[in-house]
Amino acid sequence: MDYRIASIKGDGIGPEIVTQAQKVLKAVGEKYGHGFEFMELLMGGASIDVNGVPLTDETVEEAKKCDAVLMGSIGGDTRTSPWYKLEPSKRPEAGLLGIRKALKLFANLRPAYLYPELKEACPLKEEVAARGFDMMMIRELTGGLYFGERYTKEIDGVMTAVDTLSYNEDEIRRIAIKGFDIAMKRRKKLTLIDKANVLDSSRLWRKVTEEVAAAYPEVEYGVMLVDNCAMQLVKDPAQFDVVLTENMFGDILSDEASMITGSIGMLPSASLNETKFGLYEPSGGSAPDIAGKNIANPIATILSAAMMLRYSFDLDKEADAIEEAVKKVLKEGYRTIDIAAPGQDQVKCDEMGDLIAQRI
Ligand code: NAD
């Protein structure tokens, strides 16, 4: 089949790492008989330089015409780049928020997987790391505390700040369905993380998620309080498969889950809307400190492309092929600068792309 992919290479290491993911997708296309056409679009600093704004209506419209978006990263050195002399709404990051909103992306997926070959980078106790872990953190992106009504004012002579946390059942149901669908593609276990002993919103999350769970009898469904989850992630991360949670809990827990893998250059992510459409990008930023040197790790972006195949195109076999190829190069001992042990040989960004593409 033929797929049209919006390619937003962005800034810093973005062009280097996205080029490697395109190379790997080309290899997948050749092996499995698919056509991947890339529509190159500008966003972030690259768009400011050409268009004066970080995101144009044209970029949004062109992205909407595609089957998915593959992105590098946007932004520059926040202390030295002229982009950061602009007002906040005109800076590179505003493009990212704008496109997420325009594409109605409400579910953020961040897998946290510990590669046996990279166990040394895991900051957890040796016996915990030895068990490994492989989880998918799903965070609601468009509701909750970050989008509720807020104000700061003097009440009875005392300065008071108020943020409101609100969710309606439809917002919860649509992401719970996504969560269970994803669990069906994995080890069929889903844990809802909440604070139902205190918060009304959490009690609604439990009620609605339980209703959705009834339609997925094959999935083992459980609940856990967020404070306990923060502990369990460092004590026994192997227990988790799909972890579903609201916006702020997800913001914090997904960073914790990333951190315990020990390697930012390895972590892909996806943001999905109600259809199969998604935006796929590495979890890290544009790494201006190493941009243009051909030393960035392209694996997070290559694995983001694998997520695109799995979640937007339902090409599970092809996604498996990419993930297996990544495991193979790591097993064979190839490392980019960020994941190399002291004294270990390092490969360049484009070499890593070639090595993975050759193993498809
Ligand atoms: P960063 O993730 O870009 O870099 C942090 C450190 O990790 C740096 O030392 C960098 O060299 C390293 N690193 C990151 N990705 C790597 C890779 N693939 N291979 C090897 N090393 C890698 O975070 P930062 O320095 O805080 O931010 C830099 C810029 O990126 C800022 O402008 C920020 O706003 C932007 N940013 C963009 C996104 C996005 O596009 N979604 C996300 C986060 C940060």
Image: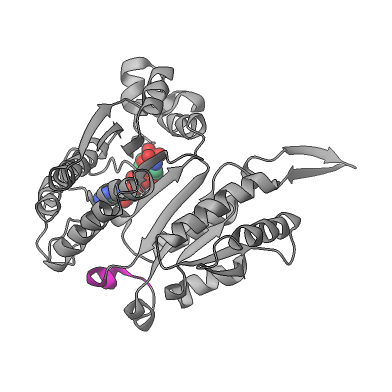
Colouring mode (rainbow / by chain / secondary structure / one colour) = one colour
The residue segment tinted magenta is 116-123
User: Which residue is outermost to the top?
Assistant: 51
Q: Is residue 355 above or below residue 98?
A: below
Residue 156 lies, in percent from the top left, at: 90, 42
Q: Is residue 118 magenta?
A: yes
Residue 25 lies, in percent from the top left, at: 20, 43
Q: Is residue 155 above or below residue 228?
A: above
Question: What quarter of the picture does the C terminus occupy?
Answer: bottom left
Quarter of the image for residue 328 reads bottom left
- Residue that appears at 47% across and 63% down: 242
- Left or right: 141 in relation to 44: right
| Residue 73 visible in the shown view | no
Which one is in front, 28 or 116?
Answer: 28
Residue 283 lies, in percent from the top left, at: 37, 49
Q: Is residue 340 magenta?
A: no
Please name the predominant secondary structure of the magenta segment in the image.
helix
- Left or right: 183 in relation to 284: right
Quarter of the image for residue 198 reads bottom right
Residue 184 lies, in percent from the top left, at: 44, 61
